[in-house]
Image (spheres, rainbow, N blue to C red):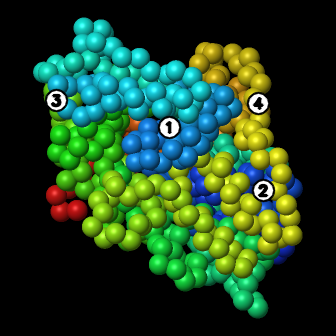
Amino acid sequence: MTTAWNAAWREHALAELAARDWDLIVVGGGISGAGILREAARRGWRCLLIEQRDFAWGTSSRSSKMVHGGLRYIAKGQFKLTRDSVHERQRLLGEAPGLVDPLSFVMPHYQGQFPGPAVFGTLLRVYDALAGKRNHQYFPKADLHYLAPGLKDQQLQGGTRFFDAVTDDARLVMRVLGEARADGGEALNGLKVLELTRADGRVNGLQAEDSESGQRYHFKAGVVAQATGAWADRLRKQEGGEHIRPLRGSHLLLSAWRLPLAHAFSFMHAADRRPVFVFPWEGATVIGTTDLDHGEDIDLEARISPQEVEYLLSACAQQFPHAQIGAQDVLSTWAGVRPVVASGAASLKPSDEKREHVLWTEPGSVTLAGGKLTTFRLLALEVLNACAPMLGKTLSDSGSAVFRPVVLPELAGLTAGQRRRLAGRYGCTLPLLLPLLEEIGSECVGASDTLWAELAFAAEHELVLHLDDLLLRRTRLGLLLAKGAAEYLPRVRQLCQARLNWSDARWQQEQQDYLSLWQRCYSLPTEQQ
């Protein structure tokens, strides 16, 4: 793994990487693409990942942050998907503590409303059986008030607590990419694939354009794996009728003090009986999610609509009426586009579409359509199994850990929780962070858990091309702090401008672009949107 992984390295390495002969090129830098690269690199394949915007730019930085077993899939009869998800959730909890952590969920039960305690308990018994251990408990109303003060009391019977997990989705992508690079894989952002190249009826590479310079490159590959999410229909040869149905899921984020929660709360929205959540994340409180057709241009950053804001605020008011949460309490928003494979039934509601994935193949190319964050490892193995015969390779060792064990160093000034958090987020790149911690110290940025040293680390070692990469994905400060962390930008500049090798004019332009993007896509929308 190259020590420096930044814009200067990228500029120097790009032509040389384009000149190589690759076994596998992965298109798409979300969690699915990162997982494919990681599994290929561990097997010694000559592999490269190319991302058109930034790593985790799409759905993988704008998900609901949950690593879950898919409880609702049981009700739809998708037992294999649930079993696989539960097993992968347990693997991730064991392999990446500090990045993937347990989260308790509470489902309150109200008289006459579905699901009642008996039905929900039956679902959870199946869920627990798939996980191999009992993981839920019913609390009568009197006890539930201790778990959930402020919960709507009228006709409340009690509640059931169960456990899933939560993560920082963008950091999960970066950690997986770090593992892949440690095994010899390479990854580039800011490269838009224009077309796949073909010879004798077979894909043999691709043409890509550098978004920074406008220069075009031809990359040669034995096989191309596409993990482009909502863009899955764009490059492949479409011979069948299957296609992607882009569905938008949006979220609101509040300061934790406005609605302090010790658990996630799952309940049915009164308007449409869809499951929604209110949950703690990164020291804040999140309300999510919506599920509706995304009819806008997928090349534009997705954003929440006024109607979705109203829907989510009404969900919060329904469950926590005394908190009186309103639009003025929202710190930030985000919207992600789910790449769901359409069933073909035009009348089917978005929430009723199955979440199963599909592989579309042609000679020299495999396209992954659909998929879930939790099962990214299994999806990667499935893609590689489809790619291997095209390369004359076979696949073995399907059960190895995604993440190397991390030895927690004794770091002066850091709590045990902070050390665990840093180990989880940075993994095998943690030694590169230590000198910056010694230089900059352990001070956090505002009320967040993010250290100033993490910003410096990202600028030096995590291929930041633009300011939104730094504040929305390498760190989540643009979501967690008021107005996109605008008041902290002078110190961010002081710490990072030289490390990014940006001129004063470049910094001013980046700051202007970032604040404009934040206002447009991560703040509350205006009625005109």
The amino acid type, in three-letter code, at marker 1 is His
User: Mark 2 touching mark 3, by CB under 8 A?
Assistant: no
The structure residue drawn at horizontal position 69% and vertical position 32%, both measured from the top left corner, is 95
| Within-10-Å neighbours for mark 2: few <14, some 14–19, many 20+ | many
Q: Earlier in the sequence, mark 1 or mark 3?
A: 1
Q: Secondary structure at mark 4?
A: loop
Q: Is residue 87 visible?
A: yes
Q: Secondary structure at mark 2?
A: helix
Q: Quadrant of the C terminus?
A: bottom left
The amino acid type, in three-letter code, at marker 3 is Gly
Gap in Å between the C-alphas at discs 2 and 3? Answer: 52 Å
| Within-10-Å neighbours for mark 1: few <14, some 14–19, many 20+ | many
In the image, 256: left or right of 47? left
Gap in Å between the C-alphas at discs 1 and 3? Answer: 27 Å
* Marks 2, 4: nearer the viewer: 2
Tell me the quarter of the picture where residue 366 sits: bottom right
Residue at label 3? 112
Q: Nearer the viewer, residue 257 or 63?
A: 63
Residue at label 4? 405
* Marks 3, 4: nearer the viewer: 3
Q: Position of residue 335 (x, y in %)?
A: 37, 53
Q: Secondary structure at mark 3?
A: loop
Residue at label 2? 40
